[in-house]
Image: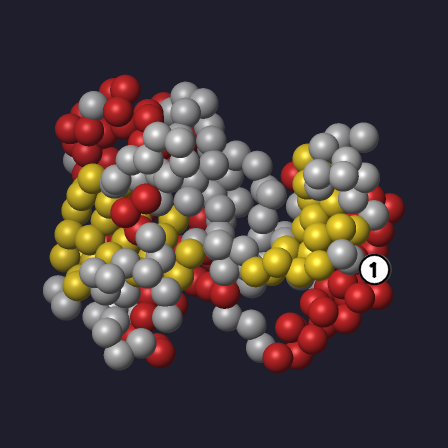
Amino acid sequence: MSENIPEKGAVIQKDLETYAIIPYIPGGLVDPDTLIKIANTAQKYHAKTLKVTSNQSIAIIGIKYDDIDRIWEDLDMKPGGFIGKKVRTAKICPGTTYCKRAQQDSISLGLEIDERFQGIELPNKLKIGVSGCPNSCSESGVKDIGLIGFRKGWRILVGGTSGIKPMIGQTLAQDLQDDEVLELIGKIIEYYQENGDKKRLGRFIERIGFERFKNAVLH
């Protein structure tokens, strides 16, 4: 039995017998009915626990392999985690919708980013952070593509990553409007898809040089 099952949105746990799944919760925003449905489904199939993840989702942990398909059917939600070498669900701060410090609408833009790009196959996983102000609550500086909102528009950082050897993203462009951001993200993903190796975007940029990467996606 495979440890990781991307097509089922599941990954095996430490006990090597049970699995975890992560339903897609766009932007970490969930209505009470959906939250109740997740809890009831977890209880129905005797999940060991629920875990709020660092990417604004809820993992259902400790389920049996034979129950995975039935759980997804009961949830009627698409997977939001464990999806392999693809564009991952964007991490989104509350933005101008809810936060008094925000300078840009991170929720609207973040959800549009998910709608357009989530799940695209790539040489490696790609994480996106959308922060509505320089406080950068979505950790945009350590995302493969990071957005930070300012009064004049969005600043785009590329190549950030956390992990054993962290990297801070480099500024690719600034003072962009939403449509310009979406266009540029598309170009970044396309270039990485066509030219990248098995490394994360930041290591790929490090190998070819930032100026070469910048010129390729901007010009």
Residue 68 coordinates in the image, percent (x, y): 79, 50
Q: Is residue 46 above or below residue 195?
A: below
Give the image quarter of residue 144: top left
Side of 125 relative to 15 (left or right):
left
Q: Nearer the viewer, residue 77 or 18?
A: 18
Q: Residue at x 45, y 48 (%)?
A: 117
- Image quadrant for the C terminus? top left
Q: How is the image coloured?
A: secondary structure
Residue 86 appears in the figure: yes
Side of 158 relative to 18 (left or right):
left
Q: Residue at x 77, y 71 (%)?
A: 40
Q: Is residue 176 above or below residue 206?
A: below
- Image quadrant for the N terminus? top right
Side of 106 relative to 23 (left or right):
left
Q: Is residue 213 above or below residue 207?
A: below
Residue 165 coordinates in the image, percent (x, y): 35, 30
Q: Nearer the viewer, residue 169 or 177?
A: 169
Determine crowd level at label 1: few under 14, some 14-19, many 20+ residues with C-alpha closer than 10 A.
Answer: few
Give the image quarter of residue 137: bottom left
Instruction: Look at the numbered disc 1 and give the secondary structure of its residue.
Output: loop
Q: Amino acid at mark 1?
A: His
Side of 50 relative to 148 (left or right):
right
Residue 70 coordinates in the image, percent (x, y): 83, 56
Give the image quarter of residue 102: bottom left
- Label total for image: 1
Q: Residue at x 58, y 53 (%)?
A: 80
Residue at the outermost front position: 15
Residue 185 coordinates in the image, percent (x, y): 32, 46
Q: Residue at x 37, y 39 (%)?
A: 162
Q: Which residue is mark 1?
A: 46
